[in-house]
Image: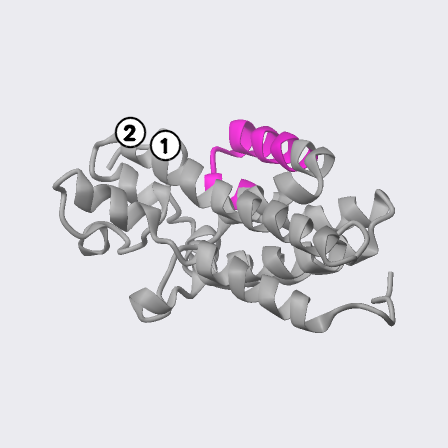
Amino acid sequence: MTAPSDIAWPVVLGCLALGYALGSIPFGLIFTRLAGLGDVRAIGSGNIGATNVLRTGRKGLAAATLLGDALKGTAAVLIAQRIGQGVGQGSGAWPALAAGLGAFLGHLFPVWLGFKGGKGVATFLGVLLALSPLALLAFAAIWLGLAFTLRYSSLAALAASAATPIILWALGDPSRAGLFLVLGLLLWWKHAPNIRRLVDGTEGRIGQKG
């Protein structure tokens, strides 16, 4: 689907900025500091995402981080849809796509943290939830199937993210497929260390200790 000729680009760019602002909220860092655990970037992988927060031993904080990182993507898309509809942009599709991209970029490259953010899986899922719940179910099915059989969380996420644009295209939504192709490429890039460990056979498996 090509962009309509009457699209309000200032609105789209504004929603991109809105998405970035929401996406750049570092929930993992905020929650761990509020809990008196210091800077989560000083432990484990140094990442601000839920997986590294879990290394503090606080499962509740990790779950809250996962939820926050996902819902900031969902919120960005839903708010942008309403903005787009309010200014006569039909369903608000293009502002919503821009906000989803912005939220993902904000999570990966938050200006407040020197552009060093998370790996993006939770925010990817949050944006997908708002734009295509059916594709989200397919993502979950792929992730669960691979995670339970191969026991590699990172591999399951990489495979599911790679399949997402194909699923969206099959559902007849090329514009959203294009967005998730971009998001997927960025997600794979951020997971380069995991990919190297998978190739070397040193990536940790689900439930593995030590």
Identify which amino acid the numbered label 2 is placed on: Lys
Q: Nearer the viewer, residue 95 or 152?
A: 95
Label ID, residue 73: none
Query: Any magenta on residue 133?
Result: no
Residue neighbourhood size for the residue with mark 2, other residues' Cα within 10 Å, grouped as few (<14), some (14–19), many (≥20): some
Q: Quadrant of the C terminus?
A: top left
Specify the segment rendered in magenta: 138-156
Residue under pointer 2: 59
Q: Is residue 139 left or right of residue 18?
A: right
Where residue 60 appears, x then y in whole percent? 29, 28
CA gap between label 2 and label 1 equals: 6 Å
Q: Where is residue 132 shown, x and y percent of the image?
A: 71, 40
In the image, residue 188 lies at what x, y percent? 54, 59
Q: Are marks 2 and 1 in contact (CB under 8 Å)?
A: yes
Whether residue 76 is visible here, answered yes or no, is yes
Residue 171, percent from left and from top:
84, 42
SS at mark 2? helix
